Image (tube, rainbow, N blue to C red):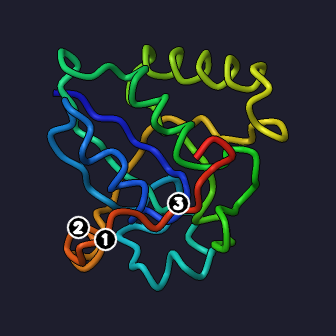
Amino acid sequence: MEKATFAAGCFWGVEAAFRDLPGVTDTTVGYTGGHRVNPTYQEVCTGKTGHAESVEVTFDPKKVSYDQLLEMFWEIHDPTTMNRQGPDIGNQYRSAIFFHTPEQERSARASRDRHDRSGQFDGPIVTEMLPAGSFYKAEEFHQQYLAKRGMVECHVPTRRG
């Protein structure tokens, strides 16, 4: 099994999008990319921790490739807006890929550049590319939030969606 970590706005919808992909064995919502140790949701929402709402995806690379996960990432959010997804505003909603290996970094950068050149988005991609650091699991209330409530999605569709 391998891990991939993505931030693409509110983690509830991001988690739901990745959870049902064949080859994904687990998803965990949490916080990463900031400076506060063990932040709470309330602290992250202040925008002062530097953390992004993120999803850690555990996947079987024999069943789903990292490149396929990247394609899902680009499809489910607008990577051209800085610190915003739909009505959600703040640095905790930024677009970011937290790579776990040099291979993931190369793939993520190549994928970003390819999508940026494609013209599919209305502006330049502003997605951050950062090494994966400490990942702090969000409160249980947030884990598989949509599934627990019988909801399918909550994210704002992209131009393609």
Query: Residue 113 placed where, x, y %?
Result: 70, 20
Say if 72 sits above or below 67 in the image: below
Query: Residue 18 placed where, x, y %?
Result: 33, 45
- Marks 1,2: beta carbons within 8 A: yes
Instruction: Report, in whole angstroms, how far the alpha carbon at label 1 lies from the one at label 2.
Output: 6 Å
- Could you tell me if residue 5 is visible in this image? yes
Query: Residue 33 placed where, x, y %?
Result: 52, 53
Secondary structure beneath disc 2?
A: helix
Say if 85 sits above or below 145 in the image: above
**Which quadrant of the figure has residue 146?**
bottom left
Q: Residue at x 75, y 45 (%)?
A: 80
Q: Quadrant of the N terminus?
A: top left
Secondary structure beneath disc 1?
A: loop
Q: Residue at x 67, y 74 (%)?
A: 87
Q: Which residue is mark 1?
A: 151
Amino acid type at image mark 3: Ala
Q: Which residue is mark 3?
A: 52
